[in-house]
Amino acid sequence: MSSPSVIVGIDQGTTGTTVLVLDQHLAILGRGYCEIPQSYPQPGQVEHDPEAIWQSVLTSFAQARAQSGPGEIAAIGITNQRETTVLWERATGRPVAPAIVWQDRRTAEMCDRLRAAGLEPLVHRRTGLLLDPYFSASKIAWLLENTPDLRRRAEAGTIAFGTVDSFLLWRLSGGQVHLTDVSNASRTLLFDLEGLQWSPDMCRIFGVAAALLPRVGPSSGRLAVTRDAGEIPDGISLSAAAGDQQAALFGQQCLRAGDAKCTFGTGSFLLMNVGPRPVLSRHRLLGTVAWQTATGTTYALEGSAFVSGALIQWLRDGLGIIRQAAESEGLAASVPDDGGVTIVPALAGLGAPYWRPEARGAILGLTRGTRAAHIARAALQAIALQTVDLVRAMEQDSGRCLTTLRVDGGATANNLLMQIQADLLAVDIVRPAQVELTALGAARLAAEGVGLDIDPEDATDSDATIFHPRMPVSERDRILSRWRDAIAKACPS
């Protein structure tokens, strides 16, 4: 009797690669993880070695497979750090330079010049994005300008560009497929968000030759098959690819317009499903493709706060009021309220919806009675208040009111933070028991891509923790009013 089929989800992230082997009820049978090194050649520059990324996938796959047992692999799904830029030789598959990571800021002046030339309105209309070094296009332009002879080779068609999903699909397929999916393509600043194709206008603005670009496919479907990929067997269907935040949205089952999830990590990433048509934000949020499956294309709005879990790290490393991040919950819970303290966590400027890179952090409302516990509680409130701002902007852009918010990420283990989030948003916060939502989303998309039935009830939603709002309206209004005043002080016009 043959073993039941299994599904593999590959989550290639900024600090490492996770591989999950799951059964058809999405229970984890095996897990592998391998860190990847980052390098910082100059201030503001962040790079990865593409070969180290590839080796981390092979190592993590072997670890997960050793744990999972002998089930035949029905499908592999890939999710990845978005915007990170890789260029490689088509003939050999060898990278021509280190990968420039999404965090890299070396192209800030280039983006400033384009903005000063009045191009940002066109860029926003066409791509849904803003001019920022975060995205891939300026990174490609930098590599073409600063790597000897690379532009000529790119225009001759001998060089390939890809975000990490595309690089992995190339390697996993033995160089047979140069492909990205619509969700990753929509993070490059080169993709027409409504037309779902590469934009000649954007390629011209950034000086990117069309010959560099991969074919754009769906997020779920029979994209390729494995071939000559080390110990990964040949002939396995590569049936999903999606950016990490979009995969988490899918993994969280945010499948209807108006559904939203927030990932709480170093920063916070909030995505809302807005349905089958793109929404251009009036509040400087990002429009993006969520995914494309056999049933059609789904779009999302995205907003990010730069400092969330990093604020708790600052309490630990900067102020020294806690020894471990987990202590923030007990310390904050030791007082009944914030004691009038408000923190603006602009330790790296403010992200959406403000986009004020010059903003600086502030602690307001200090008195002789202020204790470390009040500061800790105000820090948790600051994380939650940033999410409130993003949600309210998304509601106005989308015309939809949020009824629940699904959450994931390391900071969601803080129960007090989750309760504060429910109180300040005045909606239920749903924290699934399954925490590997990004890899889970890739596996879900992969299963759909080969026609495997996954029962939604099998996603362990019955084990989710739900935090219900319980704060009096008057107290919530008081905290929100102080927050607005504090933001105004941190961002003077």
Image (cartoon, helix red, strand yellow):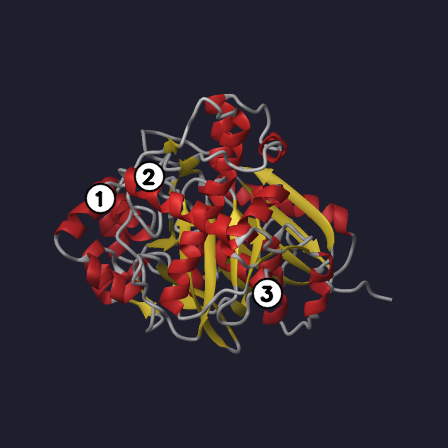
Q: Position of residue 150 (x, y in %)?
A: 26, 46
Q: Describe the element under mark 1 as helix, strand or loop.
A: helix
Query: Viewed as shown, does residue 353 lie left or right of 415?
Result: left
Q: CA distance from mark 2 to mark 1?
A: 29 Å
Q: Amino acid at mark 2?
A: Gly
Tag 3 secondary structure: loop
Q: Earlier in the sequence, mark 3 or mark 1?
A: 1
Q: Residues within 10 Å of mark 3 (few under 14, many from 20)?
A: some
Which corner quadrant of the image does residue 193 belong to? bottom left
User: According to the image, label 2 marks what residue?
Assistant: 349
Query: Which part of the image, by quadrant, shows the N terminus?
Result: bottom right
Residue 70 x/y as whole percent:
78, 55
- Inspect this view and state whether residue 182 appears: yes
- Please tell me which residue is depicted at 60% across the width and 54% down the height of the picture: 437
Q: Residues within 10 Å of mark 2 (few under 14, many from 20)?
A: many
Labels 3, 2: front one: 2
Q: Nearer the viewer, residue 25 or 432?
A: 432
Provide the residue designation for mark 1. Answer: 145
Query: Along the line of sight, which residue is nearer the eye, 188 or 328?
Result: 328
Q: Residue furthest bottom?
A: 295
Residue designated by label 3: 253
Residue 230 locus on image (x, y percent): 60, 48
Query: Residue 350 appears in which quarter of the rendering?
Result: top left
The amino acid at mark 3 is Gln
Q: Residue furthest front?
A: 474
Q: State the CA–CA distance, disc 3 to disc 1.
A: 42 Å
